[in-house]
Amino acid sequence: MLRSRSDWQDRDTPMFQLSTKGRLSSLLVGTALLLGACAETPNPAPQLAAPDKAAAQPQQVAASSAPAQDAVQLTPAISFEDWRAQFRGKALSAGIPAELFDRAFAGVIPDLSVVKADRAQPEFTRPVWEYLDGAISPVRVRKGQALLAEHAATLDAIEQRYGVDRETLVAIWGMESSFGQFMGDNSVIRSLATLAYEGRRPQFAENQLLAALQILQNGDIGANGLRGSWAGAMGQTQFIPTTYLTHAVDFDGDGRRDIWNSSADALASAAHYLQASGWQQGEAWGIQVALPSGFDYALADTAVRKTYAQWQAYGVKGTPTNVDPNDAGYLLLPAGHRGPAFLVFRNFGAILKYNNSSSYALAVGLLGQRLDGGGPLLASWPKDERPLGRSERIELQEGLSAKGFEPGPADGIIGANTRRAVRAFQQSLGLPADGYPTPALLQRLR
Ligand code: CA
């Protein structure tokens, strides 16, 4: 949770169908999409780029003396031992007992695989439809439905306490850890110590590390059980330590908040977090919509929020189900104007608090609907159009900049400024202004 920021791109196309809570299943026309691969692995959202723009510039200090092909060079100016001594002082001032600190750090050295993962800036960007295929695989849907039945009593109690629907919780459970199967086996202390020592966001990692020590201090889990992803996301819900401290709950009543070994604790913790993130009980996360011909795609922007009634006045047609005409939301075109379009509401925003990636939130929403018996999307994805790779996105930004469209720094991240610049460029060419960059558009810039 709160791990990655990856905006994706948009595009839309008519056709509708999709229930809000999946209740609408039936009657479909059109292409069945989310058929899915079967990989039962967790689904980190496709990253357009590194989450942090200000990646530390390596200064090639020395540490490593074996320059292998892909050897990782540690770059901080001080030794790990010196860093640890400094951090120990901070931890002790924050109330961590010296004995606990020394036990937690016994034998801990930087983990080069963590450094490598932290620095990775993959060139290839996975298309959103492939991501969704993996996230909503038939295997995962079947397993999720079996777990909904198996944990029905617990989920009843969680729904009553937190007002978050069970399908969303089980969808998050599936997305984060394949229902507890893949939680990450890295020592959280070691991973976070590595990132605090030399990662791209050392202050963030240091705060997480301090929170991890507090978790040990509270006694909810032993040092050996404090395991997670390379980035320090832990347990069946992949909470980062600060989120654990503020939102993990003991739901099974054994006195410990155990998101690693207790699915009741994990599911209730996720519900508690969503509730605190503004979840609206009974409200749809979103609906698939059809847009009228001649629609002004510049309206499909996270900054343009209107009520469902107002969108309807623009000719936007959704599957109504339980959508209140006064619910406000924005249009989302995950693959631009040629792909499916969604109108997303407040609960989509709550899911984004869990993981700030539109593709992640969409996968959770759609997986939840499938778990609830909903059918596949009707609109088809523009599979003939691959997403731009990282270096192409940088080239796009440079090209837009050269033409005076002001996309912001050429960092390969398609944020609000780049999207606005893409729209302006599209408008100058008389193209649908969906803000979604394609290889063809990049070609027009060259
Ligand atoms: Ca417990």
Image (tube, rainbow, N blue to C red):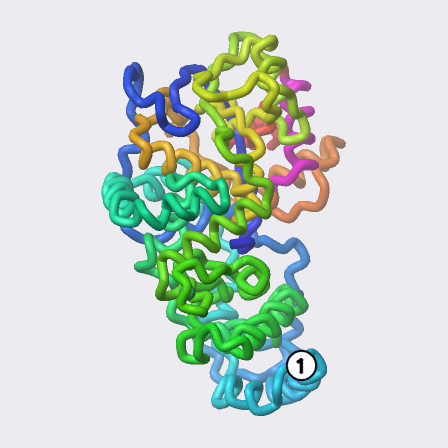
Q: Position of residue 356 (x, y in %)?
A: 56, 46
Q: Nearer the viewer, residue 139 or 200?
A: 139
Q: Position of residue 372 (x, y in %)?
A: 32, 33
Left or right position of 368 against 112: left
Q: Nearer the viewer, residue 315 or 245?
A: 245
**Residue 391 appears anywhere in the view:** no
Q: Position of residue 99 (x, y in %)?
A: 57, 91
Left or right position of 204 against 183: right
Please give the name of the residue rendered at 67% of the width and 68% of the height, measured from the top-left corner: 203
The part of the image, by quadrant, that contains residue 181 is bottom left
Which image quadrant: the C terminus?
top right
**Residue 235 appears anywhere in the view:** yes
Determine the main secondary structure of the stretch shown in magenta.
helix
Please give the name of the residue rendered at 54% of the width and 29% of the height, measured from the top-left corner: 344
Q: How many marks?
A: 1
Magenta region: 414-429
- Looking at the rendered structure, the secondary structure element under dot 1 is loop
Q: Is residue 419 magenta?
A: yes
